Structure formats: C-alpha cells, structure tokens
C-alpha cells in the first residue's frame, strides 16, 4: 500500500517506521520536514499536496496541536488554534484527500485520552478529541467507494517526557504500540471505530 | 433563580416559557431579538452582555447553527460557521459568563441526536455535537465555586417541520419536553451529564 503519514513527531515517526517495515510505500508530510510539506490549517496547501502525490491507499494522520491550558486560563487564540489544528485540520485532511484516495482506502485520525479520562487541564483536549471522534463516527457512514475511517486515541506517550507530569497516575503507551494500532485499522476492515490505547474503566 | 436563555428559536422560546412559569426571572438573549442582544461568535459582545446583566444563577444555551450538508458537499465556510457558532460559540458563552455567574450556578448547553444516531447528512452535526459534549464532560471537572455544566441532546423537534424530512423514522420530541429537561438539570445537582431526549439503542 501507499500510505501518507502526516506529522513527523513521535507518533508520525513510529507509524512511518512501522509501515515501511511492513513493506508499505510511505510518504511523510509535515509543515517543514518530511517528503512533502503542507499545513493542516490551509485547505489549499492540502489540495495541492494530494494533487502532487497522486493516487494512494491510506492516510495516517499523526499531526495536530492542542494547548494543555486550564479552562480558566486558556485564551481565545489557544482555543481557536487547537480547534483549527488538531480538530478541523484533520477534517480538512480527509476532505482534501477524498478525490485522490483509491477505492477501499482508509483514513486514520488521532484523538487522545483527554475526554475519556480526567486531568486538571483537559478542556481544550477533550473538546477537540470529541470533535474528531464525532467526525470519525459520522464520516464512516458517509464515505463513498468502500472508503473507511477510524481514530486512534492514545494515552500519554512514554516518549513524551515533557507531557508525563500532566498525567500523574496514568500508564503511558510506547509510540511503537500506537503505530501498531494504526497498522491494524489500516490493514483490516475496521471503520467508524475509536481504538483506545488506554483503560477507560 | 435568574436564568439567562440564549436563543429565541423553538427551544429557546420553550425554555424561557417553562422557566417563567416555574417562577424564575428570565432574561432572553439573541442576535437581534430578546431582552438583550449578543453574538455567540463574538467574544467581546458576550463579555459586554454579561457585564450588563449583572449576577445571575444559570445560563440555558439554546442557540447555535449547524449546516445539514452531506460530507461530500459541505463547504469550508459551512464547516467553519458550524464550528464557530454551535461549537465554539457555546464555549465562548461559558467562558464569558464565568466571572459573573453566582456560586453554585449552572450552564446548560445543547448538542443533538446527530452523532449518536445515523442520518444521510450528519457529519457537520456529529462533529459539532462531539465538540460540545467533549467540552461539557471536561469543563464539569474544571469549573470553580460549585458551578455545574450539563448538555441537552434533543431528537429532531416536533415543531421543526422543515427538518423532519431529514430524520425519516425518528421520533420527534416536543419542544416543551426539551424545556423540561433544561429545568431538570438547572434545578437539580446534575453536572457533566449529557441528557439525551432520544433513544440510542
């Protein structure tokens, strides 16, 4: 399969490595690194990206930023940027890729543990994750041509040492395990699923 | 209680009537009608609104627009407007009201059946409802001073005859029943709850 991986952070790098190791053809995308450059918040740059790349089989979305600010302190700008980046940005990605993806292809987006579980500064993350998961569950019913869409919801990453203090008492998940979940939903007939890499009980 | 009701549509009118009948002091707000005017998408107009009104006990949010467009046809503008209005607009409302609401007061937002149930053109609604419900569940854990927040998720309204054709086979809910649910969560110690006025099984 030809798999487009957006985001060259910890998850994106792990997904690209796992997909390449499984024998897939990987194209990495980010704002300033990777094989191709594009900006999730700029619809025209996404349209141009997919027109350049040509046909492909899967999009693995591993990009998008959310500010970990407490509700009482978060600014209008932090709200707007979080929604436009990890929220609407991933929706833009799907909408721009739609005319170019092969029949039976798949989209895999990313949400996260915030919203399912409780931390002291979670409202931006919970809001944006709710947005992404709501989109995935509904888009799965609207996609044409046998296309599929799923969402990976990781716990805090074991590798993200700067975020671990925000998740006291949470079991971190290694990025390689998150990458496996991406490969699992890309390679099997999952659709409309939120795959949680954390305990919710 | 002094209750601020935003939105003078079918739900807003029913909530305002039910709250007044229960003996509460009601202030109605909309863009161009009601006792006070404000725009959900304009943070400054919301800040000015709550500074004008003075202390109050509850905000019942009954406003916000989402386009019922199929995923393949929805435009960038329809996405952006839906997210900024019913999504971030209701979050703005809470953030602007926060410094003015009395201790122990409550916020009640509105989502909807799309996202829980399946219709042919649901992705914008499901995305925005997911955003609002994600916010409500998380904000409930972050609000200070005994403040509470809940969300009402109505089925299509019996009175909204123009929307009924988009919900074939769905049982509509009368606006008066939705208004009761608002009064219920305002008047009892509910918090972080999504109250669904539709069957999800």
Image (cartoon, coloured by chain):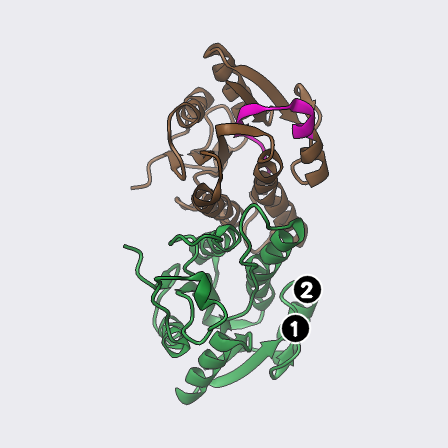
Chain colours: A green, B brown
> Where residue A42 is drawn, which disc sits there?
2
| Circle 1 residue | A38
Residue nearest the observer in this picture, A94 or A119 = A119
Viewer-nearest residue: A64 or A159: A159
Establish if B50 lies above or below B82. above
Q: Which residue is found at the position 55% from the left and 82% from the top? A: A27
Tell which subunit mark 2 falls on: A
Front-lying residue, B68 or B111:
B111
Instruction: Indicate whether B89 appears above or below A86.
Output: above
- Residue A84 appears at what percent x and percent y? 62, 57
Q: Quadrant of the N terminus of chain A?
A: bottom left
Q: Is residue B94 left or right of residue A171?
A: right
User: Where does residue B156 sit, x and y in percent of width and height?
Assistant: 46, 32
At label 1, counting other C-alpha atoms closer than 10 Å, the crowd grade (few under 14, some 14-19, many 20 or more) is many
Q: Nearer the viewer, residue B158 or A87?
A: A87
Circle 2 sits in a helix, a strand or a loop, which is it?
A: loop
Where B52 sits versus B119, above or below? above
Q: Is residue B169 visible?
A: no
State which quadrant residue A150 falls in: bottom left
* Label 1 SS: loop
Q: Pointer 1 and pointer 2: residues touching (CB < 8 Å)?
A: yes
- Residue at 56% x, 17% y is B26
**Looking at the rendering, in which quadrant would you find the C terminus of chain A?**
bottom left
Magenta stretch?
Answer: B49-66
Whether residue A30 is visible, yes or no, is yes
State yes or no: residue B46 in magenta: no
Question: Mark 1 belongs to which subunit?
Answer: A
Q: Answer with left or right where residue B188 lies relative to residue B92.
A: left
Q: Residue at x 34, y 72 (%)?
A: A188
Q: Are marks 1 and 2 on the same chain?
A: yes
């Amino acid at each position: 399969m030809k798999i487009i991986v957006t985001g060259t952070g910890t998850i994106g790098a792990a997904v690209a490595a796992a997909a390449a190791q499984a024998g897939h053809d990987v194209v990495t995308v980010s704002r300033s690194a990777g094989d191709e450059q594009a900006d999730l918040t700029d619809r025209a740059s996404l349209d141009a990206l997919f027109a350049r790349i040509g046909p492909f089989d899967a999009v693995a979305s591993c990009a998008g930023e959310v500010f970990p600010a407490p509700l009482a302190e978060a600014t209008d700008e932090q709200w707007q940027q979080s929604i436009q980046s990890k929220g609407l940005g991933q929706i833009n990605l799907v909408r721009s890729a739609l005319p170019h993806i092969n029949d039976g292809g798949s989209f895999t987006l990313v949400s996260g543990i915030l919203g399912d579980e409780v931390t002291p500064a979670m409202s931006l993350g919970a809001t944006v994750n709710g947005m992404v998961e709501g989109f995935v569950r509904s888009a799965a019913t609207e996609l044409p041509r046998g296309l599929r869409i799923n969402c990976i919801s990781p716990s805090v990453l074991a590798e993200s040492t700067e975020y671990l203090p925000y998740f006291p008492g949470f079991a971190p998940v290694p990025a390689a395990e998150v990458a496996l979940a991406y490969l699992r939903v890309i390679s099997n007939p999952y659709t409309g699923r939120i795959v949680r890499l954390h305990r919710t009980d």
